[in-house]
Amino acid sequence: MSRLKISRSGLRKVAMQEIRPSVTQRDIICAEIAAPPTAIVVFGASGDLTRRKLLVGLIELFKRGLLNERFYLLGCGRKKLTSKQLRQIAQQAIQENSTDTSAKAIAPFINSLYYVSGDYNDASFYENIKIKLAELGKKHKVDGAVVFYLAVPPFLYGTIVKHLGSAGLSCPDEPDSRQRVRLVLEKPFGFSLQSAVELNNKIHRCFDESQIYRIDHYLGKETVQNILMFRFANTIFEPVWNRNYIDGVQITIAETIGVEHRASYYDKAGALRDIFQNHMLQMLALVAMEPPISFEADHVRDEKVKLLRSIRPFKLGELDDVIVRGQYGPGSINGREVVGYREEPGINPESRTETFIAAKLLIDNWRWKGVPFYLRTGKRLARKNTEIAITFKQVPHSMFISAGLGDMPSNVLVLRIQPQEGISLSFQAKQPGSKACMSTLNMNFSYKSVFGVEMPEAYQRLLLDCVVGDQTLFTREDDVEVAWRLLTPVLETWQKDDAAPYEYPAGSYSFGQADSLIESDGRKWRKLGGA
Ligand code: BG6
């Protein structure tokens, strides 16, 4: 499929007046909106996120012609680096992670990178940034449009935002400039309901909600975005997408990796805060929400929040029946011995932090009343697998009962988020030969074989959307708070009780208590990686 590059005004022009025969309606829909002249200021520019995701995402946009020529990036951080050193770091990161890294292809981008160091608590740092922005703005002809990207540990968010406000860099009182100044925050956004509300309040003193882009990188994944297209651009699924036809839904995020080099963050967070509160609930919201009025940011976000609000609160006295936590012990993954969570470098040997969650959620609304949503996520599991599986009810009556086919398998629709991105639908069909011989077949769609491309990294999508000012794929204040409202009582209960998470061997598929959670309802977890 061809991809045009059209500026906002160009897009309007093409859409309204000049549809030349060579520009089809599909081209217009598939056109990317190219970024206007912009500065990106990255706090935490010497860190891992900047190196692995931001610089690599930006260079891809640059190579696709989607970053404006009038662009620059100002890296900020505590580490004393020069602009030249940031450029070297960027060059190396790009060479490791991108194709076509010839000097010609990347030089203009590399030459637009700058760095300034300072102390996040020191007001003079922000004055320096302001001076630098004025100077670079002139040089690159960028007039006031700036994205502040906080790629720093979350405890620094409040401090940096306050100083941006005091230095007059957030401009909340000038509606015209406000639209061109944006703030991007990485997850986790708060550690509980109270801390999220406090953080939202602090940020709102300096930035209006329309300027804030809270990243959940799952929303930038093509396959997650496709949930909306799949549900709302087809007629055939929506009529059966409800309690009358659906028996249950399973959402899985299984990883083979362990805690890696993030011990100090992860041991305080755990799987509920790290993945469940954000990525899992976002996927649940997209798969279960009502149809939004339009593909406008707030229409989509309104429906997500409404859905999250309808999730039945956990009964704290009966938590073990509906939400179970595990922690990986020693084991082996793909034939390689790995240590248990408590032996990982930097982890407290007595840690009670969970690395696995299995939960059953019920949604109290007309569409979903009584349909269980089973969610599970874990680190150091046997297979990497993220998917949403929708199991339909069995046929109401089998006419093949005399042939021994009383209990017919259900149709299962699987949205495969990663790897092997695609969609499959299982159904029963007659096998050639004997009269009543039937088997379960799969209709399978694979992105790779149909579109012949690797999935673009989520950060490319999200970075471009921040720069063009589209908030659809970013979580809104109320979205974050409603998710914390559901989960904070669970976290508090776990903190009070003395119980440790159940141990599961690294490399396993599940463990007894997680299995019981679903099996007590007469259902089974899907095998990781299929069926
Ligand atoms: C991050 C979590 O948000 O998502 C990590 O902090 C997790 O712990 C990662 O590994 C998973 O993302 P992906 O894109 O690899 O599924």
Image: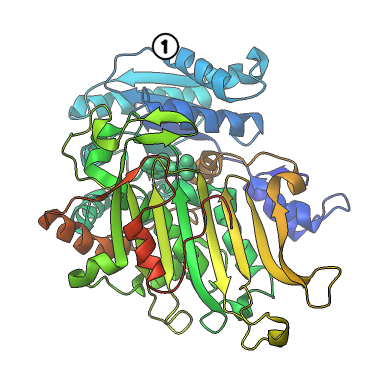
Expressed as whole percent of the image width and height from the top left, the position of residue 500 reads: 19, 50
Look at 28% across and 39% down and name the residue there. 266
Q: In what quadrant does ligand 1 lie?
A: top left
Q: Is residue 118 left or right of residue 372?
A: left
- Which quadrant of the figure contains the C terminus? bottom right
Q: Which residue is mark 1?
A: 85
Residue 172 visible (yes or no): no
Look at 64% across and 77% down and name the residue there. 408
Name the image quarter holding residue 424.
bottom right
Q: Residues within 10 Å of mark 1 (few under 14, many from 20)?
A: some
Which of the two residues, 45 or 493, is positioned nearer the viewer here?
Answer: 493
- Secondary element under disc 1, as helix, strand or loop, is helix
Look at 37% across and 36% down and name the residue there. 331
Which of the two residues, 467 or 219, is positioned nearer the viewer here?
Answer: 219
Three-letter amino acid code at the position of disc 1: Gln
Which of the two residues, 39 or 270, is positioned nearer the viewer here?
Answer: 270
Look at 42% across and 40% down and name the residue there. 507
